[in-house]
Image (cartoon, helix red, strand yellow):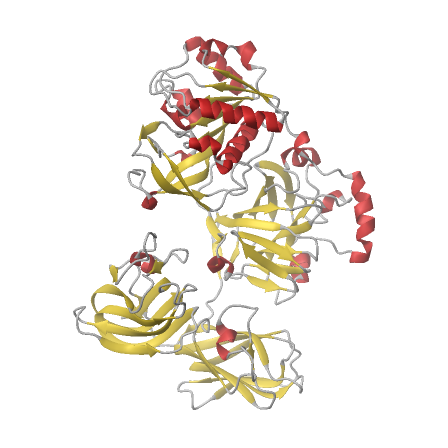
């Protein structure tokens, strides 16, 4: 981050001449590669197209290409001239013992290996080679289209690809899964084609550090057309550059990480913005704007963890990843003072404020950082490991900083900075792995619940539901008069211990917080006579199903009351056991599934908010879950995708034939519908009669049924 006023930016840029922006020239040179395509088994007719493509890539990127099928080229002296050796759809036993020894020595000396397609169908009796390629070929179905899931979008070979890439190829199954030994860059969605046999975890492109050198492999490349595919050619070029050491990449295996931001709006909805500016989302990528602000993850704090984040600065930009801070309470400067920023800034003259630094406190090892750093316009990857108060930082797999903090960062939140206008950073794929566990934050009992208000600002979209939707960019606004109130129905009785109000500029100067068992008899649990806006985080003590904020004096008499967020926290009241989630993983049926899609009905009960059920584009449609036995149903929660049900009913049945309606919705507005119901049955059905978007069907991320 930069504390300087924008008026001083010119001085900072002048000083940047003291610290040149690292470029690819800082990495190992890439001048010459060897393409080896000898076959002792099946011969692919795509080999000539592959050689031509690599020669064209070399001509366009400054390296020469020698193509051979002569294994006699594998001598220590000859291999030394090449930065990488590309095994292009080789098959069978292609090297003798002496040649194997020479190639193994070449890799041990820092050489690079690129394997394409049938390179995995080679040298089965040479176990060292099997480790180098990562996995041996097992079988393949007929050529067909499949969806490639791009897992690592910071790696130079895959950063240009979309998160989901559909293409035609001959899709290999492998004898072993390389995920435990290599960084998987892309994998196959086995549900999108026939013949996949790897149990749903099907790597197809990966890289690794091996035996002193570097290895990059892709199972794609069977067809001639593949080598004319622009995306594939760019991927192959990146693989050659990685293997040659020309571009850095984190090729360490990665397992056990939990995504905090996976590129979807659903995951972004869990984050909160503190301060001005924010982030846009496109193509799975966050882009900062304005500031100075902070996008932070409030779901839990973290202790003893590894945090990974992919980032890219388009030019001389500025931002950072924050760790170890308490709830900022809307103030983005609190994390600056109480946590740490892991800086992203190419040109600051102060070494402790450049990329890889713990801002203002610990400069990175400049030589290691510069060698590992991909230049502006390219993606990079941070790993930030926090153990107690120790902070270790890896850039593209290279450790560049190790700092022990004097601050209390052992257990705190994480976030991403938007530093200011024109200082824009892109982020992808934020994930965490905890060694010592996390401290879950209390559940917001008000999120998505039924809410009512005394009024809504005339002619506005500032509905009462906005205050409990979890979106800090939407708000409730009242009429321009006193008094006004907003009430949330928690669905059951709770011991309420905290109420958090995030006011817009038109805040309540005087108000009280009340609880009620029946929405009629109210007990005051907090009275505020001199509110000053911003965030009022109130400690309270009371029991009730309903919580009301009752405003008696507005701060701005020209406006009403305006709340970004109304959060309620507490514990179930004695004798009020919480209903169990009954639908998770249960058998489910539907009237239809969107044609040619993977949006099966089971997706709505799998607990994964990134998968969904989608119906045909017609009315009516339904989805039914079988709870396994008769249950008392008290709550149904529907999380809609953009194509939601405008009009629908929720029904229960003892036999999947005779239905009783327990809720009817005639004007749903999408998002989350959290419905309090009262019914009994083994089967629960959502029966849609009117779609909100006639051009699409019904689409549900989650269908949750609660009861006993």
In the depicted view, which residue is nearer to us: 237 or 338? 237
In the depicted view, which residue is nearer to us: 212 or 263? 263
At x 34% / y 60%, what residue is drawn? 614
Image quadrant in which the C terminus is located: bottom left
Image label count: 0
Measuring from the top left, give residue 365's x and y in whole percent: 68, 36
Please tell me in which quadrant of the rendered image residue 400 appears: top right
Q: Name above or below for residue 71 compared with residue 197.
A: above
Q: Is residue 524 visible?
A: yes
Q: Name above or below for residue 644 compared with residue 435.
A: below
Measuring from the top left, give residue 100's x and y in whole percent: 44, 13
Q: Name above or below for residue 430 compared with residue 612.
A: above
In the depicted view, which residue is nearer to us: 212 or 146? 146
Measuring from the top left, give residue 675's x and y in whole percent: 36, 75
Viewed as shown, does residue 541 lie left or right of 329?
Answer: left
Measuring from the top left, give residue 153's x and y in whole percent: 52, 43
At x 59% / y 82%, what residue is drawn? 561
């Amino acid at each position: 981050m930069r504390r300087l006023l924008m008026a001083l930016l010119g001085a900072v840029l002048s000083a940047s001449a003291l610290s040149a922006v690292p470029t690819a020239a800082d990495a190992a040179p890439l001048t010459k590669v060897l393409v080896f395509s000898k076959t002792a088994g099946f011969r692919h007719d795509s080999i000539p197209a592959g050689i031509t493509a690599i020669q064209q890539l070399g001509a366009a990127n400054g390296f020469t290409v020698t193509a051979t099928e002569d294994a006699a080229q594998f001598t220590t002296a000859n291999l030394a001239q090449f930065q990488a050796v590309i095994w292009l759809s080789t098959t069978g036993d292609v090297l003798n013992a002496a040649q194997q020894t020479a190639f193994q020595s070449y890799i041990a000396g820092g050489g690079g290996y690129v394997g394409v397609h049938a390179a995995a169908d080679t040298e089965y009796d040479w176990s060292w080679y099997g480790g180098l390629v990562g996995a041996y070929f097992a079988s393949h179905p007929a050529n067909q289209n499949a969806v490639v899931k791009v897992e690592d979008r910071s790696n130079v070979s895959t950063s240009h690809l979309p998160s989901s890439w559909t293409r035609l190829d001959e899709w290999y199954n492998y004898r072993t899964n390389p995920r435990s030994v290599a960084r998987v860059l892309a994998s196959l969605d086995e549900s999108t084609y026939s013949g996949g046999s790897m149990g749903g975890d099907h790597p197809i492109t990966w890289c690794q550090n091996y035996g002193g050198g570097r290895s990059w492999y892709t199972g794609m490349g069977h067809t001639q057309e593949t080598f004319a595919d622009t995306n594939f050619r760019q991927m192959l070029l990146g693989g050659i550059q990685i293997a040659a050491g020309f571009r850095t990449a984190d090729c360490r295996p990665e397992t056990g990480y939990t995504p905090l931001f996976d590129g979807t709006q659903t995951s972004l909805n869990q984050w909160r913005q503190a301060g001005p500016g924010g982030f846009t989302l496109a193509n799975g990528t966050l882009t900062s704007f304005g500031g100075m602000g902070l996008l932070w993850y409030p779901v839990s704090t973290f202790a003893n963890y590894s945090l990974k984040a992919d980032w890219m600065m388009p030019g001389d930009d500025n931002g950072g990843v924050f760790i170890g801070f308490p709830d900022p309470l809307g103030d983005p400067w609190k994390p600056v003072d109480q946590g740490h920023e892991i800086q992203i800034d190419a040109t600051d003259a102060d070494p402790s404020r450049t990329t890889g630094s713990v801002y203002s406190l610990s400069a990175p090892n400049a030589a290691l950082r510069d060698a590992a750093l991909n230049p502006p316009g390219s993606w990079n990857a941070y790993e930030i490991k926090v153990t107690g108060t120790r902070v270790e930082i890896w850039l593209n797999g290279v450790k560049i900083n190790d700092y022990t903090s004097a601050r209390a960062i052992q257990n705190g939140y994480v976030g991403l900075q938007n530093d200011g206008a024109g200082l824009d950073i892109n982020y992808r794929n934020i994930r965490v792995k905890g060694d010592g566990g996390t401290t879950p934050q209390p559940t917001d009992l008000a999120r998505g619940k039924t809410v009512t208000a005394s009024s809504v600002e005339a002619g506005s979209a500032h509905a009462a539901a906005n205050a409990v939707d979890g979106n800090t960019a939407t708000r409730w606004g009242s009429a321009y008069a006193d008094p006004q109130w907003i009430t949330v129905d928690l669905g059951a009785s709770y011991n309420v211990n905290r109420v958090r109000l995030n006011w817009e500029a038109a805040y309540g100067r005087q108000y009280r917080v009340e609880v009620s068992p029946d929405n009629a008899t109210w007990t005051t649990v907090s009275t505020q006579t001199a509110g000053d806006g911003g965030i009022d985080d109130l400690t309270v003590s009371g029991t009730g199903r309903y919580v009301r904020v009752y405003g008696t004096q507005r701060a701005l008499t020209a406006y009403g009351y305006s709340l970004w967020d109304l959060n309620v926290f507490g514990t179930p009241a004695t004798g009020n056991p919480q209903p169990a989630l009954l639908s998770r993983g249960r058998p489910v049926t539907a009237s239809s599934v969107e044609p040619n899609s993977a949006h099966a009905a089971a997706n709505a009960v799998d607990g994964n908010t990134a998968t969904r059920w989608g119906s045909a584009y017609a009315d009516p449609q339904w989805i039914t879950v079988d709870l396994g036995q008769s249950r008392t149903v008290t709550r149904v929660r529907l999380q809609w995708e953009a194509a939601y049900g405008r009009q629908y009913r929720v029904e229960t049945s003892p036999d999947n034939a005779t239905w009783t309606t327990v809720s009817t919705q005639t004007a749903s507005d999408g998002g989350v519908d959290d419905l309090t119901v009262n019914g009994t049955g083994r089967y629960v059905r959502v029966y849609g009669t009117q779609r909100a978007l006639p051009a699409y069907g019904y689409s549900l991320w989650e269908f949750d049924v609660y009861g006993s």
